[in-house]
Every structure is written in C-alpha cells, then in structure tokens.
Image (spheres, helix red, strand yellow):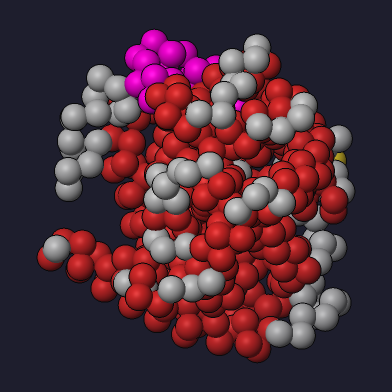
Amino acid sequence: MANISKGEGRDQWGSKLGFIMAAAGSAVGLGNLWKFPYVAGKNGGGAFVMVYFIMLFLVGFTLMLAELVLGRHTKLNAIGAYRKISKKWSWVGGLGIATGFMILSYYSVIGGWVIKYLITAVTGGLNVTDAAVLSEMFGSVVSSTGGSIFFHALFMVATLGIVLGGVGGGIEKASKVMMPALFVIIILLAIRGCTLPGAVEGIKYLLVPDFSKLSMGVVLSALGQVFFSLSLGMGCMITYGSYLPDKENIPQSATIIPLLDTGVALLAGLATLPAVFAFGFEPAGGPGLMFETLPAVFASMPMGMMFSTLFFVLVLFAALSSSISLLEVCVSYVVDEYGLNRKIATWGLGFGVFLVGVPSALSFGIWSEVKILFGMNFFDLFDFLTSNVMLPLGGLLLCIFVGWVWGTDKAIDEASNNGQIAFGLSGFWAFLVKFVGPVAISVVFINSLWGFIAG
Ligand code: PHE
C-alpha cells in the first residue's frame, strides 16, 4: 500500500521491489514486444540492434539516472521538477507531458488491438497457421471503424481504472502481479521461437550486423527506440522518481531497469524473428509482425490455444503497465499544480487522451488516406513526432539541464544519498551527461532530420 511521505502528503512507492516492477513495467511494453522486433526487422536486423546497444550505453543508462534523480530531488511532476530548479526551464517539462499525452493516444489504439486479439484467442479464432489468413485477419481488425474505437476506449478505461487506485494501491500493486508473469512467459516463448525448424536464420538476422544496412535513418530509429523503450525524454522517470523514498539506491535501480527492458526486447526479438523466417513472413513486415507471426507459431504447437491466450494476456499486461505510467505523468502534473482531485484529473485526462486517439484509431481504416504532414497519416505522424523528434529533443534538453543548469555535482549528491551510498561511476556519468549525451543526440538528431527534410 502507499505510504504517505512526511508532511507533504505525496504518495510513495511501498517497497523497492514495487518501484522496480513499476518502473520496469513502464519501460517494458509494446515498445519491446511489438515495436522492437518490427523496427529491427525494418532497419536491417543486427545492424539496428548493434546501434541500439551503443545508444543504450551512451544515453540510456545516463538519462535513466538523470531523470530518477531529478524526480526524487524535487519530489514533483515533470513541469514542477524543472521549475523548482530553474523557472525558465519549466516548458521542457511541459513538452514532456504533451509528449506523454500524445504517445498514450496512439498507444491505446494498439492496446485495443491486443484486447481484440485476446478475445479472439480465447474463443479459438486464432487457431490459424496460414500466413495469408493471419495477415488478412490483422487487416480487418485494424481497419474496422467501430471496433478500433471501441477497443481503444476499452483500453483507456482499463488504464484509468488502475491509475485511479493511486501510486501504491493502483500502479505498484498491478505491476507487481503483471511483471513477474510477463518475464516467465517471454522466456518460454523465446525458447520456443529458437527451437523452431529454421530458427537459425532469424537468430542470425537479429544478431549478426550487416553494415551495408547502416544509415543515419537507422541510427535515429535506434536512438528513438532507446528513448521510447526506456520511457525516457518525457518526464516519466522524473515522475516515478518523485515517489521514491530518500533512502533508495538510485544508481542501482537505474542499472537494473534498462537491463530488464533490454532483456525483454531481445527475448521478444528471439520469440518473433525466428518464427518470421520459419513461417515465411517478411521481417520488414511492419506493425502487424507480432499479430501475424506469433499466432502462427502458437497454432502449430501443442496447446496452442492456451499459449496464444497466455501470450496476449501478457502483451496486455505489458501495455497496461506502460500506459498507466503515461497517464500518471499527466495526472501527477494536474494534481500537483492545480490541486485537483485525483479521480477527476484521471477521468478528465483519460477522456481527453481517448478523443485525441480517435484519428489514430481510424488511420488503418477509413482515414488511412488522410495524410497530415510528410505524407503520413495520424498514427504514423504521432509515432514519428513523438519517438523520433519529441523524445530525443526532451532527452537532449534534459542532458543540458542536469549537466549544466542544475549541475552534476548536485545531481551526484542526490544520486549518492549525500554520500551515504557508493556511486562509483559518478565521474564517468557526469562526463556522459555533460558531453557525450548532448553531442550524440544532437549529431544524430540534426543529421537525420536534415536528411528527412532535404530528402
Ligand atoms: N516504454 C514503453 C514501451 O516500451 C512506452 C513508453 C514510452 C512508456 C514513454 C512511458 C513513456 O512500450
């Protein structure tokens, strides 16, 4: 249950494990299970994975620590945290909250597909091994107008139902049940994927880099994926950090969370890509990859119906443990800054997100030809703007803020609980935040955006 912190009445995580599960729950989500395999597939497999790792080490761990520390130090939402240190910077927190709101609007659309697939799996409708039939099924699920909106609404209701329970009683409790179950199942599925006939092809595709596939676009996608997958660059970890008790060991948590997240992304790749090759799908198949290949794998094995049901339950858990964090970022802001009742804030924001998500829900059906900008429909545009523009920009500004405005000395004091716990790599971390992070992000960002606009 939630403890109330002294004096401030602010919610806190009930236990260390609870916090790790909630933060890993935020990180592990559709980004790992659905997006990572198909983005890797689209961007040349191993080459993408290699760049992903480089970005993870250069900016992933670094920013995870920076966000958690900033959150715990200020004990405020994303805007409040920046403002407490420098008024001029509060808009960066605002950018983050807007990003979270936008991500949730289309995230929930995919969450809706997952609910629909879960129902189909339970009722035996996924017992299909034919790739063509599965592709067609995916097409009809995502293009149905009423269905897409209905399941999008249902997913939002589930999300806000958990957030209404609060930090300890809702988010933490739910994550502590969902995450361990997810870890077990994804391991089982990866083992199954790797033991399929012809699996070697898929494993090679995922792990052996083909350098001819490298381009600035691949590097930006990998960078965007690091931010998206680790829930960084939008104040989510600032908000979760703000509920941390003072004694918590942040450097340790900031190591564990990215490791869990990356582990699950790789396992999801190992569960999916071998099956792609074994069943004759295209690795660059796009957003349908998870929905089309895994059912084929399950249908071809004993107790397939049970496995496919279990799988979609777990995808739903992963999606929910992330969507609640996206909503919490917005709720936390409204509750902190306007003193609004948590219930009203949650319902109001949840409804707003639902409305903004409707055009994304229609982007695979009646509005698929409505191109907003750069020839993209709503869904693609929201995804591109948030993952490849707003999150990296938020991350860049965070580096500059923590490295140069707040200052790494003060951040290190907070990270080490004022010298009470060891933070061996503090000097190296300071170097990464001040120099490597800003330079790496700007170079990738400017280059690829330039390429995008010019090309
Ligand atoms: N990290 C989540 C995922 O991988 C998505 C997310 C992004 C959640 C940003 C919170 C903030 O699915």
Residue at image coords 30%, 22%: 365
| Residue 169 x/y as whole percent | 79, 31
Magenta residue check for 155: yes
Question: Could you tell whether 440 is left or right of 309 in the image?
Answer: left
Residue at image coords 44%, 37%: 288
User: Which residue reaches farthest front?
Assistant: 197
User: Which residue reaches farthest left?
Assistant: 454
Q: 10 or 168: nearer the eye? A: 168
Question: Which corner quadrant of the image does residue 442 belong to?
Answer: bottom left
Residue 61 visible in this rendered orientation of the protein: yes
Span highlighted in magenta in the image: 138-160
| Residue 175 x/y as whole percent | 75, 39
Residue at image coords 65%, 89%: 427
Q: Is residue 34 above or below residue 364?
A: below
Residue 312 visible in this rendered orientation of the protein: no
| Residue 372 x/y as whole percent | 18, 37
Q: How many marks?
A: 0
| Residue 166 x/y as whole percent | 71, 32
Quarter occupied by the N terminus: top right
Q: 79 or 202: nearer the eye? A: 202
Quarter occupied by the C terminus: bottom left
Residue at image coords 24%, 28%: 368
Q: Is residue 443 above or below residue 275?
A: below
Dominant secondary structure of the residues highlighted in magenta in the image:
helix
Q: Is residue 72 above or below residue 99?
A: below
Magenta residue check for 193: no
